[in-house]
Image: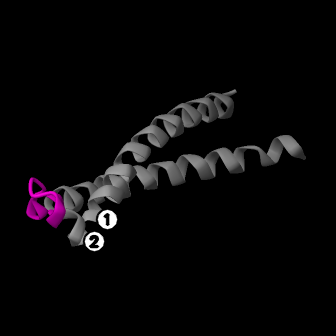
Amino acid sequence: MIMTNLYILSRKFHRILVLIISVVGLLMALTGMLLKYTFIAKKFTFIDLGLVRYIHNNLSPIFSVVFLGMLITGIFMYIFTFPKNK
């Protein structure tokens, strides 16, 4: 009973983290692309590479923590199915 409730809570938490990591991952990809390919930023004069670097650097710890939470909840959900199959 307690394991089932923990599994449901883990699944809900994992789904929320998937949504967060999707948004943060998209922002990290866009800012990383702008930092790697600076010719894109040169074409658009309104893009400040210093601000882009600041955003990218400050999103990376958030991305790491959210990804760690997804990893822990995902592993728990994976392991939880073993006793039911046997």
Q: Is residue 39 above or below residue 14?
A: below
Q: Amino acid at mark 2?
A: Tyr
Residue at position x 87%, y 44% from top?
85
Residue at position x 21%, y 71% from top?
38
Mark 1 and mark 2 residues within 8 Å of each other at the beta carbon: yes
- Please rate how many residues cluster around mark 2, counting C-alpha atoms within 10 Å: few if below 14, some from 14 to 19, many from 20: few
Residue 58 lies in quadrant: bottom left
Q: Is residue 60 left or right of residue 46?
A: right
Query: Which numbered tag is attached to residue 33?
Result: 1
Residue at position x 68%, y 30% from top?
4
Q: Is residue 70 left or right of residue 54?
A: right
- Please rate how many residues cluster around mark 1, counting C-alpha atoms within 10 Å: few if below 14, some from 14 to 19, many from 20: few
Q: Give the x, y percent position of residue 17.
A: 45, 41
Q: Badge 2 is on which residue?
A: 37
54 in magenta: no
Q: Give the x, y percent position of residue 50.
A: 9, 63
**Magenta part of the protein: which range?**
42-53
Label 1 element class: helix
